[in-house]
Amino acid sequence: MDSEEVLLETEDAMQKAVEFVATEMSGVRTGKANPALVENINVHVEAYGSSMPLKQIALISTPEPRLLTVQAHDPTSVPDIEKALKESKIGITPINDGRLIRLPIPELTEERRKEMVKMIKDMAEQGRVRVRGARKDGMDSLKTMLKDKEVTEDSFHDLESEVQTLTDKYVKQIDESCEAKEKDVMTV
């Protein structure tokens, strides 16, 4: 493995950390109906014998700003979908009319908004930890290359600085996502 591959792998791992944070934050309720709130909930559907993301077995839409609807492609899976929604941690009680499940999005209280901001900050910290882990892995690979004399001391320091630049870039992206989501949650 050469130094370019190490940098590419490190950057790829950091990018995945940012994507992880974005996906996690998209599931945080902001008081507005957003399909991302439920689309990644896994539903164990008896007819198919496995767990599948909700977005694969149902159509999720937002007919009104404070309402999500979930319409199963197969009407026999509606009870399984309803059960998965009840067991999920989204804090919304589904209303099932047999063919369509409605998820009314309640107003968020100030206390609940503050709890959500804490959750968002925790998600961001998890992402930063993943980025730092990728930095450590990249640096360990570079140190091994230096020890094996695959790179010179000068090249090592240049590569070390590139890894730090990547780390700073991706941590900044996570921080910006966190700030934007906090603002979105706290906006009444």
Image (cartoon, helix red, strand yellow):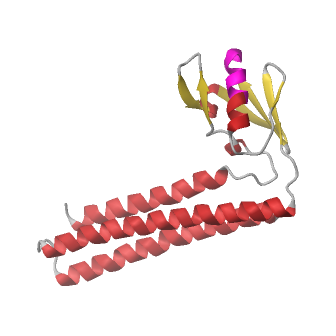
Give the residue displayed 72% in from the left and 22% down from the top. Answer: 79
- Percent x, y of residue 181: 70, 62
Is residue 184 something one can see in this rendering?
no
Locate the C terminus by quadrant.
bottom right
Q: Residue furthest left?
A: 149
- On screen, residue 17 versus residue 62, left or right, reads left
- Percent x, y of residue 32: 81, 50
Q: Can you tell which quarter of the image residue 97 is in? A: top right
Q: Is residue 9 magenta?
A: no
Q: Can you tell which quarter of the image residue 138 is in? A: bottom left
In magenta, the rendered stretch is: 73-82
Total labels: the figure holds 0
Q: Main secondary structure of the magenta part?
A: helix
- On screen, residue 49 versus residue 152, left or right, reads right
- Percent x, y of residue 99: 78, 19
Q: Can you tell which quarter of the image residue 25 is in? A: bottom right
Give the residue displayed 20% in from the left and 64% down from the top. Answer: 2
Locate the N terminus by quadrant.
bottom left
Q: Does the magenta stretch include residue 75?
A: yes
- On screen, residue 171 versus residue 161, left or right, reads right
